[in-house]
């Protein structure tokens, strides 16, 4: 079972939460962050390069120093205040008619090392190193990671009772997404949550934040090696996560746009597709994939339905059944000659939150030649892949809404 603990969050006073809370560090580029950031915005801590004119590279030593300076200043000015004792927190996100309720807690780095915190993506060392620097210089998890876990009736009962109370924070962000936050400060309930996780929840699944999770584990291991009196209970063994029951999460499609047809004429390309797909022209109106193994393609002003033929995939293989695998093997590699999705400059990826109109726009502009939209991966597929120890292809899952940064910070002291 997983190991969790409550923590004394560092967080903004209620009356300035909308000024402090900000999008995650990797959602905005530096110019966008500079334009958005007000005086109290957490972006001055997560993207401190915006405090320089001109904007400095985010790996500049002066930027790291500015991050530390700003975090200290926010606490001194009372824009971030630490809770008096350890609590759990409930964080609800609303997107349209769907709301998901997560528990904000601290997970243990040992669970990552032993595989109880399960991943479905590969990480890159350079990105892990960058996240490690940020944790170490602040001695804190400034932003949470995003975990899922198997539905648990006892935890749902606790959350359902809590959300009937008045929230600590409740606001709508610039994208129209709602964010609501409650503090679980009842000692008995706090103990009960710890007990349920440590006796009933077998695993966490990383939904978003693979690099931050890996970095937290490395920081914990490094501090452990430097402490001859290490017990495993020190605060540096824990890192902040928002954990949602699987049934409340929805994965959004992650689509592809390609710059060229690998030297093929349009008719040659369509003919090549017919070997493995049933190809049907759908006209000028946007066509959405209707089921697993059905794809949408936009080419030369026309939308097409592509349905993979029988025998072109293996529904018993957790990776082979994925539409990203089918598209990559049969089209991107097999026809278009794109071998490595991580390094090729001929392909780009578009989160489904932007809509299929974005795919049309990028093709119509001449920037891209063809676009593919995929049916979204399910949470059950993600969990099956993680449980089997497999890794998803690059750019497979997109979760929305993103966790708002600044609602809680975890100090490693």
Image (cartoon, grey):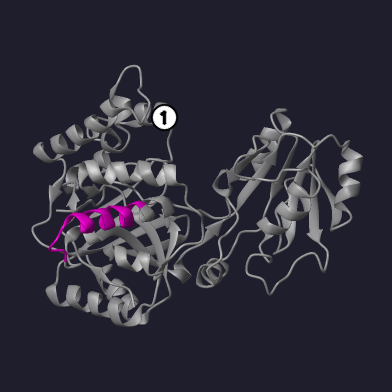
Task: Judge left or right: residue 371 versus residue 89.
Answer: right
Q: Is residue 307 at least partly visible in the picture?
A: yes
Residue 67, position in %: x, y? 24, 34
Where residue 264 sits, quadrant-wise, is top right
Q: Residue at x 16, y 47 (%)?
A: 13
Horizontally, is 260 left or right of 276 in the view? left
The magenta segment: 215-230
Look at the numbered disc 1 and give the secondary structure of its residue: helix
Res. 75 image quadrant: top left
Q: Which residue is mark 1?
A: 32
Percent coordinates x, y for residue 247 in the rendering: 47, 71
User: Which of 116/15 is in front?
Assistant: 116
Identify the residue at horizontal 47%, vertical 59% (top origin).
97
Is disc 1 surrounded by few (<14), some (14 to 19) or many (20+) residues within 10 Å?
few
Quadrant location of the N terminus in the rendered image = bottom left
Taking depth in this image into account, of 217 and 268 the one nearest to the observer is 217
Q: Where is 211 relative to 190, above or below?
A: above
Residue under the point 73% across and 70% down: 314
Res 24 seen here: no
Q: Position of residue 187 (x, y in %)?
A: 12, 73
Q: Main secondary structure of the magenta part?
A: helix
Query: Residue at 83% across / 64% down in the picture?
Result: 309
Q: Is residue 265 above or below residue 326?
A: above
Answer with left or right where residue 268 lies relative to residue 120. right
41 falls in the magenta region: no
Question: Quadrant of the rendered structure where residue 74 is?
Answer: top left
Q: Nearer the viewer, residue 98 or 208?
A: 208
Image coordinates of residue 241 in percent, x first then y, are 32, 59
In-front residue for pair 79/389: 389
* Residue 59 vertical placement versus 11 (above, below): above
How many labels were placed on the picture? 1
């Amino acid at each position: 079972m997983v190991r969790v603990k409550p923590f004394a969050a560092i967080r903004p006073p209620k009356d300035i939460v909308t000024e402090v809370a900000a999008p995650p560090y990797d959602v905005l580029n530096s110019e966008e962050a500079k334009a958005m950031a007000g005086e109290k915005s957490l972006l001055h801590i997560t993207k401190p390069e915006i405090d320089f004119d001109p904007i400095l590279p985010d790996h500049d030593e002066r930027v790291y120093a500015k991050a530390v300076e700003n975090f200290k200043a926010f606490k001194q000015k009372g824009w971030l205040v630490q809770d008096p004792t350890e609590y759990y927190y409930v964080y609800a996100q609303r997107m349209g008619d769907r709301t998901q309720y997560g528990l904000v807690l601290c997970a243990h780095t040992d669970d990552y090392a032993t595989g109880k915190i399960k991943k479905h993506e590969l990480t890159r060392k350079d990105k892990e190193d960058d996240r490690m620097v940020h944790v170490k210089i602040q001695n804190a998890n400034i932003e949470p990671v995003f975990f899922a876990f198997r539905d648990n009736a006892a935890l749902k009962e606790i959350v359902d009772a809590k959300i009937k109370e008045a929230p600590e924070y409740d606001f709508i962000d610039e994208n129209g997404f709602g964010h609501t936050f409650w503090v679980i400060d009842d000692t008995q309930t706090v103990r009960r949550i710890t007990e349920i996780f440590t006796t009933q929840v077998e695993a966490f699944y990383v939904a978003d934040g693979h690099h931050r999770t890996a970095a937290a584990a490395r920081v914990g291991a490094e501090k452990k090696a430097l402490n001859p009196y290490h017990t495993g209970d020190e605060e540096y063994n824990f890192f902040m996560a928002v954990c949602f029951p699987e049934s409340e999460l929805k994965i959004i499609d992650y689509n592809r746009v390609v710059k060229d047809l690998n030297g093929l004429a349009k008719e040659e390309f369509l003919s090549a597709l017919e070997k493995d797909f049933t190809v049907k022209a759908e006209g000028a109106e946007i066509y959405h994939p209707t089921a697993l193994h059905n794809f949408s393609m936009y080419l030369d002003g026309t939308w097409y339905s592509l349905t993979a033929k029988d025998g072109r995939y293996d529904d018993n293989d957790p990776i082979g059944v994925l539409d990203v695998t089918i598209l990559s093997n049969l089209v991107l590699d097999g026809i278009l000659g794109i071998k490595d999705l991580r390094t090729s400059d001929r392909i780009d990826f578009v989160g489904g939150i932007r809509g299929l109109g974005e795919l049309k726009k990028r093709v119509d502009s001449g920037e891209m030649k063809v676009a593919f939209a995929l049916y979204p991966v399910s949470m059950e597929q993600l969990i099956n892949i993680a449980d089997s120890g497999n890794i998803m292809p690059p750019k497979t899952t997109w979760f929305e809404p993103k966790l708002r940064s600044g609602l809680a910070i975890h100090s490693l002291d």
